Image (tube, rainbow, N blue to C red):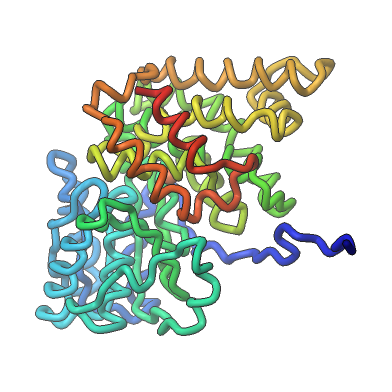
Amino acid sequence: MAINTERKQFPLLYVHQHSRGVIGWGAHKMAGQECQMYGIKHALLVTTGLKGTGIVDEVEGVLKASDIAVTRFEGVTSNPKDYECKAGTEAYLNAGCDGIVSVGGGSAHDAGKGIRIMVTNDGPDTNLRDFCAFLDPHYTTRIPTYKPVMIPQVAINTTTGTGAEGTAFAIINDEEWVYKLILVVPGVGPSVGINDPAFMRLQPPHMVAWAGMDAFCHAMEPFIGRFNMPVVHGVALRAIKLLSENLRQAYANPANDVAIENMAWAQYVASMSYNMGGGMGMVHGTAHMLSVIKDLHHGYSNAIMMMPIERFNVVAVPERFKEIGQAMGLDIHHMNPVHAADITLEEIERLRNDVGIPQVPLKEFDFTDADVEHTAKWASNDLSREANPRDITPEQIKEIMRSCI
Ligand SMILES: [Fe+2]
């Protein structure tokens, strides 16, 4: 039998553009000008409400000062749902909006993206499943048939973790499938992402911790991932360094201006790691299932799944974990990669514990064997599996999930 000498895994890789960004203290004051730049005269302000912070009122005031009309849509919840996007689309069309301003964390930004996809297509009758990126059939074969999203979105970010204010896809719950759709549509990345530490320091400590561990996974997964793209290695390591040097301090004291500003950068740089082409891995693949089945916060779910998955993955890429450990400041340069990787995993776990997130057994969330089966079925065809550094079968997904119960 002839041996095939062609490169089998990923002979072609795609480097993606990140959204424009405005970062700094008081950056939210640029929202009106940014809307004008993209031709938004009447914005649908998409948010979860951010009750008690005053942020939504503040943003509405900034927009109105620039003569931007505002219709509020506060019908978004954590783990944004398909029916919420439908309601937002109806609100957008009824009010005659011409753009989106999303205010909040990833839920608001992704709901804004979902609404823009629906408005671009058949309005409230659009089925978001038609735009879901699966491995089989591979999503890249369907993208050329999609209508590009031309509606502008100004994404004002309030958490130190999501990255969704700059990324080119949306994650929306399909409530009937009990699955998080990964929507990859040309043009769906926000026109601009605004990161203002003045908003971020209003987060409660547990949100800093959850969002921060999400950001850590955003840097770690592409760095160890099998797409192995040099373009993302630098930003991923820098994000890991910033996170390991600032997350504890920001969690302990969200009003620590230096720590929260560094976290604003850390989450932004971390999101570039996967969005520019590094992809995700099975921490996100399994955490998405945990989130959608038990409605747990995305960052918290990642924090729960990161150690079981990476202890499975480490055998494929011990040298990469050694580099992560060095970025975290560990003195391990003299060690062989296998031992260095062990110490790095302990350090990552310690960071997670230090910000108040212990390894909680999944039975605490009533996660059952039926949930294990459901997770394995859907996570196997999830985009996150493609870049995971180690081959992982549905049976292995089940074994890992059962070990977490
Ligand atoms: Fe994430």
Q: Quadrant of the N terminus?
A: bottom right
Residue that extends furthest to the front in the rendered view of this protein: 1
Residue 299 seen in render: yes
Q: Is residue 398 above or below residue 169?
A: above
Q: Residue visible at 35% across and 60% down?
A: 155
Instruction: Give the quarter of the image for residue 156.
Output: bottom left
| Residue 198 in sight from this viewpoint | no
Give me the residue at 41% from left, 35% from top: 302
Coordinates of residue 60 in the picture (x, y in percent): 18, 61
Horizontal and vertical percent position of residue 118: 27, 76
94 shown above or below 136? below
Hey, which quadrant is residue 373 in on the image?
Answer: top left
Asked if 215 appears above or below 10 in the picture, the reply is above
Indicate left or right for 283 with 5 as reference: left
Q: Residue 2 or 354: which is nearer the viewer?
A: 2
Residue 333: % across, % down: 80, 20
Residue in view at x 31 percent, y 52 percent = 179
Above-or-below relation of 128 to 329 = below
The quadrant in which the C terminus is found is top left
Image quadrant of ligand 1? top left
Q: Nearer the viewer, residue 127 or 52?
A: 127
Picture residue at 46% right of the left edge, 55% below the top: 381
x and y, in percent, of residue 222 in the image:
60, 45
Looking at the picture, tell me which residue is in the foreground, 49 or 169: 169
Exactly how many numbered labels are in the figure?
Answer: 0
